[in-house]
């Protein structure tokens, strides 16, 4: 039987390891939540924004400050923070599941202001025991249902705002690396020729983004940018140089701090794992 001292050391070790992982995840989310990063993702993967420049999306179409771990997914607490997406609307409760990153963007070239609510999730485990896309569908459903009494009232379902749930998977298996898949709601006419306007059903989309790494197929564009940004082996200086030269992303002091934290925390987690093995 372990002595109380050994038990205490073991518990402290586990707590420290958990804290490192939580801090690592938080640094990753904060890097992804930078407007210029979200603008690259939005332009690359959302059809509504493909004709816009990254600067236009970041400075003109993304509204307010993207929220990080601020909005609970539970039915009775998502509503208050959807409208306006203001950071002052944070309603986080400890222990509750929250959206990793949530922001709102206005669709360009429309007759009226039509919002697109976009949820971005950073996922380290591509197969956590359930299909990622299924969880994404649930998130989209929650973002749609939470609009009642905010985006629309009574039976004005035509005022529903389109939602996206984008899942960025950091360590996918080899077969999935550097692949992007969009899951959309599409009509299939079974009898007759009835056609509904696209705007009446094009209201949700789940996008899975599996990163890869150098030397793998399709390693370019935003896939490469995200892989470099979220790398736990590249230094902040390396990231800053590549992102500036290749993508025009000027890393702020805050971004460099988070990038450094990711590397340090990753090393701490790896060292602890190595000690356990040896």
Image: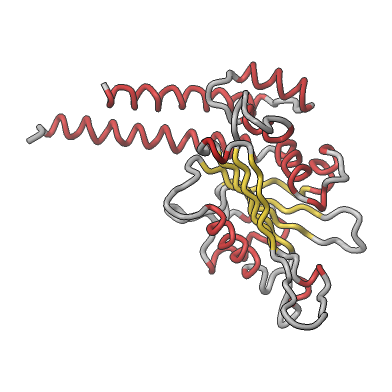
Residue 157: x percent and y percent? 74, 76
Residue at left 30%, top 35%? 14
Residue 206 sits above or below residue 188 on the image: above
Q: Is residue 161 visible?
A: yes
Residue 190 sits above or below residue 119 on the image: below
Residue 51: x percent and y percent? 88, 45
79 or 125: nearer the eye? 125
Q: Residue furthest front?
A: 191
Residue 207 sits above or below residue 264 on the image: below
Colour scheme of this structure image? secondary structure
Residue at left 72%, top 65%? 203
Which part of the image, by quadrant, shows the C terminus? Answer: top left
114 or 134: nearer the eye? 134
Residue 57: x percent and y percent? 81, 44
How many numbered discs, if any? Answer: 0
Q: Which quadrant of the figure has residue 184?
A: bottom right
Residue at left 70%, top 25%? 251
Q: Is residue 162 left or right of residue 81?
A: right
Q: Which quadrant of the figure has residue 204?
A: bottom right
Q: Which quadrant of the figure has residue 151?
A: bottom right
Q: Is residue 113 left or right of residue 215?
A: right
Q: Is residue 88 visible?
A: no
Residue 141: x percent and y percent? 61, 66
Which part of the image, by quadrant, shows the N terminus? Answer: top left
131 or 95: nearer the eye? 131
């Amino acid at each position: 039987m372990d002595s109380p001292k050994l038990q205490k050391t073991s518990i402290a070790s586990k707590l420290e390891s958990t804290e490192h992982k939580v801090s690592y995840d938080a640094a990753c989310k904060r890097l992804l939540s930078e407007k210029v990063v979200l603008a690259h993702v939005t332009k690359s993967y959302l059809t509504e924004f493909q004709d816009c420049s990254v600067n236009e999306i970041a400075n003109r179409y993304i509204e307010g400050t993207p929220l990080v771990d601020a909005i609970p997914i539970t039915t009775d607490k998502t509503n208050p923070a959807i409208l306006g997406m203001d950071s002052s609307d944070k309603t986080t409760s400890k222990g509750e599941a929250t959206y990793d990153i949530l922001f709102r963007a206005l669709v360009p070239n429309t007759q009226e202001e039509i919002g697109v609510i976009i949820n971005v999730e950073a996922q380290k485990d591509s197969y956590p025991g359930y299909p990622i896309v299924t969880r994404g569908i649930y998130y989209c459903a929650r973002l749609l249902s939470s609009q009642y009494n905010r985006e629309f009232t009574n039976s004005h379902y035509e005022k529903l705002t389109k939602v996206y749930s984008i899942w960025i998977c950091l360590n996918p298996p080899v077969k999935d690396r550097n692949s992007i898949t969009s899951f959309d709601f599409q009509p299939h006419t079974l009898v007759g020729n009835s056609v509904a306007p696209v705007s009446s059903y094009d209201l949700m989309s789940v996008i899975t983004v599996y990163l890869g790494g150098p030397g793998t197929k399709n390693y370019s564009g935003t896939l490469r940018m995200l892989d470099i940004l979220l790398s736990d082996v590249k230094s902040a200086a390396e990231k800053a140089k590549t992102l500036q030269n290749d993508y025009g992303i000027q890393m702020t002091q805050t971004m460099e701090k988070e990038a450094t934290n990711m590397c340090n925390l990753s090393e701490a987690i790896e060292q602890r794992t190595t000690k356990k093995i040896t």
